[in-house]
Every structure is written in structure tokens, then in C-alpha cells.
Amino acid sequence: MCEEHPADLSKKTVVRQAHEDDAAALVRLINAAFQVERFFLGSDRLNLAEVRSRMKRGEFLLLEDAGGLVGCVYAELRGERGYIGLLSVEPERQKSGLGRVLMNAAEQYFREKNCRIAELRIVNLRTELPPYYRHLGYREAGTEPFPKEIPAILPCSFIVMVKELL
């Protein structure tokens, strides 16, 4: 899966599936992109062991340009559903359309695997996220408790959002 995308007109971007040797770069990128969550998490979003564990269950799709890794998204097959997580874009490149490129790549990956629904979870404290995902065609489908094994500084929960893949 190596596709070219016109999202960043000044630089050519390519989406590809991650390999084991991409794990350390993924940790750096994801933790940089998720700095905004430190107000309720108080620590890095994930570590190398978590990235490697996710690589065994699903795929990280990487977005690269001539300068290297600029974004990623995690895609996991769950029967007829595809789970999307960890949408990450280098902080200085956010709000440039690269997140949409990654979301489109994840949705296409799921379509190719015959998934009917894409699903994601966002933390309710990230109030800027529901409108973003609604704009991409997702709708709220419920809530879930925040995992007890992740120490949160503030009380929080997940908002589950879904999109039918046509």
C-alpha cells in the first residue's frame, strides 16, 4: 500500500504500512502529536512496547514526504469493523490536511479488507475533536469508560464515533 496524495501541495507525500524498524520513530511522532493531552494524562501517550504490541494486532499507516515521517494512523481489523486510533501529525504540520489524508488511507484500508464500519474513540475532554470527525462523516455512537490502567489526572471518558464505509 504505497499511494501518493496531494494533501500538501508543496511536498509530495506517500502513505505506506509501517515496519518493525519504524517503531521508535512512531513513538516520537505520536508523543509529540499528543502533547495536547498532557493536561489530563500527565505523561507520554505511549511507549515502544505499546507500539510493538499494536503492530502485532493491526497496522500503522505512515505518511512520509521528502523529509521523512510526518504523520501516522493506527488501523486494526475487528471483524466487519475497522478501529482507527492514534491519528498523529507532526505538530508544525497540523491543520494542513494531512490528518484527512491519513483518515482516508485508513478508511480505504478497511474497505479493501471488507469492513463495513470505521470506528474510533476520542477522549471527551478533547472538545475540538468531535466537530473534526463529524466533518469527516463520523457520528457519535455512545460512550465508554476511560481505561483504569491509564492513570488520568482528570476524570474522563471516551466518545465512540462511527462511519459507514460505502
Image: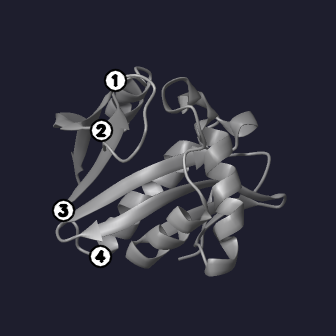
Residue displayed at 37% across by 54% down = 84
Q: Position of residue 135 (x, y in %)?
A: 37, 31
- Whichever of labels 4 and 1 marks the residue nearer the N terminus, that label is 4
Label 3 close to label 1 by CB (< 8 Å): no
Three-letter code, disc 1: Pro
In the image, 137 versus 75, the foreground residue is 75
Quadrant of residue 117 within the rendered picture: bottom left
Q: Is residue 53 left or right of residue 82?
A: right
Judge whether 94 appears above or below 9 on screen: above
| CA distance separating discs 3 and 2 | 26 Å
Residue that numbered label 4 is attached to: 113
| CA distance separating discs 4 and 1 | 36 Å
| Mark in the foreground, 4 or 1 | 1
Q: Which mark is residue 32?
A: none
Judge whether 112 appears above or below 147 on screen: below
Judge whether 34 appears above or below 101 on screen: above
Is the residue marked by circle 3 packed among few (<14), some (14-19), or many (20+) residues within 10 Å? some
Q: Is residue 16 left or right of residue 147?
A: right
Q: Which mark is residue 116?
A: 3
